[in-house]
Image (tube, helix red, strand yellow):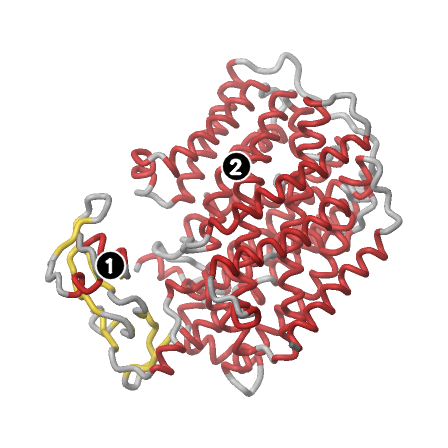
Amino acid sequence: MLTIISFVFFTSLVGLITWLLTRNDNHESSAGYFLAGRSLTGGFIAGSLLLTNLSTEQLVGLNGAAYADGLCVMAWEVIAAVSLVILALLYLPRYLKSGIATVPQFLEKRFDHGTRAITTMIFLVAYAGILLPIILYTGAKGLTEILDMSTLTGIDDEFTLITATVWLIGVIGSIYAIWGGLRSVAVSDTLNGFGLLVGGILIAYYGLVTVNPDGALAGLETLRQATPEKFNSIGGPSQSVPFSTLFTGVLLLNLFYWTTNQQIIQRTFGAKSLAEGQKGVLIAGVFKVLAPMILVLPGMIAFFLYGRVQVGDEIVPVLDKTTETVAMVMSAGDEQKIVHGEDVQKLLKVDSEEAALTSGMATVEDADGKTWEVEKLFGPGVVVVAGDDGKNRYLEKLSQVELARILPPREKDKSYGRLVQNVLPGWLNGFFAAAVIGAILSSFNSALNSTATLFSLGAYKTVLHKNASDQQVIRAGKIFGIVIAIVSMLTAPMLLGQDSIFGYLQKMNAIYFIPIFSVMLIGQLTKTVPALAAKIGLISSFAAICLGYFFPPVAKVVGQIHEFHFIGAVFLGTILLMLLIGKIKPRETPWVQEYSGDVDLTPWVFAKPLGIGLVIFVLAIYVYFADFSILSV
């Protein structure tokens, strides 16, 4: 009951303060509704940037990745700081000079209306079909695990619980986004951001104290001594962020997300001036380099607490724990897999788990035709660890208490919720719940507000009703926002069953990130590449990634390399193709950007020094924690 009361209190407090601060805002004009009247200052921009980005796909997904792979997954956060520097110093001055409200609007000025239309359509399809459902699903999934919603609500069915939570988040988020406009989104983001920052730090603090009761610093030292392999900034070939991908897919996804993604950068379009915009963006960059304290460290703490088991005089990492009736260890050369439940039945071609246990088969063939040697078949309650000789050891006599404590790597996305439940004092649960749902709402209402903006200004105003008044444009945006919100709330629960929240998100994002970023980069850095090149680049790269993901013959070839290298190759190919077209058939006259006069373009005096300092700091972090020996393993 205390959790529910404190949750309602803090959530209501954010809503009340947001209303008090924005009740007199102008929501009758397009600039007032979609761009907060171009009145946002650095603090609100920084807070909104951080909270729009920070949601349960980071809290749950990135901490889950850290549980399995350690510090190397910090790349998603610290490289973001470099991307924000590029936004502040290169992209933002050009965006504000044009006086735009959407990314496709800039592409129209640089290329033509057709380029804007294609980009708007890609954004709308991606936001409605990928981004919004993922935000709602990951938000609901994370919230139910972090707060143990099943116990709080008495609902045992996971699908029902996820659906109910999705609609709770969706309805509240829609109220902010559709009826409040961008300024309401930015103000609520900033308030929720403070709560989540405090809550995240408390989780890390209490987790470290659990590791070592002598204090947080003592806990950090114990953690580093006990799990030194987790404190490596360099990702190995088999980890989720291999070192080589930092220079291909990881870098490209980060650059798009922070420099070209409408959902994120729309609040920078509403900056009061270039100086305020740069200030907000770079302040956000400072917080991004510190973000691993709440987005990576808790996952590493959880691994210390739940990912290891005592074997004789040693404490060793857990490879897996069986929970289904049957599990199977199989190997092919140096590669090894552990499969469970129905997957075992399919491989063994039997119709029951009992039959699987007594099958006696020595080899199996997977869906790709690859042959695997069956090493062992066993039932539930077995913990698998690596022996000194490199072979698996099977611990079959652990107590029920010990089995319940252990969390295998394949269940890594449960680690953050488990940590919160175990280390956070009960009286703080409601406060943290409010902060978490605030982060979820922030991502959802920002994406929904951006979707409405893209439709209103990019489709309704320019195609469907060219002579529409500001009131008609805003009304169309609100109606479209309501429809998209409902569709997203209906489809989000269908994502139940995805293996990795964060991995799925990054994979799906690449479908629209790479085409739009490629065209934007060419648009920013060249003067003579024509609109034809932009259109061909958008369509060809979008089609190439879809083929690589969803068309089996192509997907099989792509599967031979890391998917981040694949999207890097698509990006490079798209850039070269557009440059080639620009060489063969350039624009008749070089493009010249015009100043709209909407905002003061005087840069922030500390923009360059702070930007350079952030880049140096990111490099220093990587060098300090680097152990390149993992690349030769």
On the picture, is 446 further left or further right than 298? Answer: right
Residue under label 2: 512
Which residue is painted at 37% across and 68% down in the image?
A: 408
Taking depth in this image into account, of 292 and 187 the one nearest to the observer is 187
Q: Residues within 10 Å of mark 2 (few under 14, many from 20)?
A: many
x then y, percent, for residue 10: 73, 68
- Tell how many labels: 2
Taking depth in this image into account, of 466 and 279 the one nearest to the observer is 466
x then y, percent, for residue 70: 44, 65
Which residue is painted at 17% across and 65% down in the image?
A: 357
x then y, percent, for residue 88: 69, 45
Residue under label 1: 336
Taking depth in this image into account, of 384 and 230 the one nearest to the observer is 384
The secondary structure type at the circle numbered 1 is strand
> Dividing the image into 4 quarters, which one contains the N terminus?
bottom right
x then y, percent, for residue 431: 67, 71
Q: Does the rendering let one see residue 618? A: no
First-in-chain label (2 vs 1): 1
